[in-house]
Image (cartoon, rainbow, N blue to C red):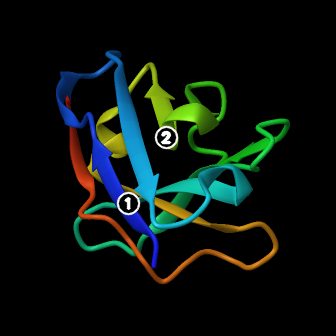
Amino acid sequence: QVQLVESGGGLVQAGGSLRLSCVVSGRTFSRLAVGWFRQAPGKEREFVAGIIRSADSAKYADSVKGRFTISRDNAKNAAYLQMNSLKPEDTAVYYCNANYEGSGWSNYWGQGTQVTVSS
């Protein structure tokens, strides 16, 4: 099964930046699409950004377009989420997910990393 380890979260002031990392093991990373999701207290987990295995295409939630950038490094089995111009409403636990393209997102999740944006 796939294992995912997220890191890079923290406390930042509004307008600041953070870079999240996700290291994937248990599957051939270069064959996987990778996505970032987040879950705020009392809310359902929501899609934030996704990138296909070739990194030629990425998708973003409307709420983060122009502020967040997803990327990947197949040599390091890692994906990243660069978050700029952070807002208090970006506060959430951020999770990554990875699965073979066309298979839908996996049922396996990492422990997540907390992002807190103060106003």
Residue 37 in view of the camera: yes
Q: Is residue 100 above or below residue 49?
A: below
How far apart marks 2 and 1 lie (CA) works out to 9 Å
Q: Is residue 99 left or right of residue 4?
A: right
Q: Dot 2 lies on which element?
A: strand
Q: Position of residue 90 (x, y in %)?
A: 36, 42
Direction bottom: furthest residue:
107
Residue drawn at point x = 38 percent, y = 66 percent: 3
Q: Residue at x 24, y 49 (%)?
A: 113
Asked if residue 65 is positioned above or below residue 19 in the image, the reply reads: below
Q: Residues within 10 Å of mark 2 (few under 14, many from 20)?
A: many
Q: Nearer the viewer, residue 31 or 49?
A: 31
Image quarter hosting the N terminus: bottom left
Image coordinates of residue 58 in percent, x first then y, are: 75, 42
Name the residue carrying label 2: 78
Nearer the observer, 70 or 26: 26
Residue that carries the numbered disc 1 in the rendered image: 4
The quadrant in which residue 55 appears is top right
Residue at position x 20%, y 24% from top? Answer: 12
Specify the amino acid type for callout 2: Ala
- Indicate the position of residue 110 as horizontal and vertical percent values: 32, 65
Q: Is residue 23 left or right of residue 11?
A: right
Residue toward you, 47 or 54: 54
At mark 1, the secondary structure is strand
Q: Is residue 31 above or below residue 58?
A: below
Please state, as top left, top right, bottom left or bottom right, where the C terminus lies in the image: top left
Determine whether, in the image, residue 105 is placed left or right of residue 113: right
Residue depicted at x 25% and y 73%: 42
Decide if residue 54 is on the left or right side of residue 33.
right
Residue 39 lies, in percent from the top left, at 34, 63
Q: Name the amino acid, label 1.
A: Leu
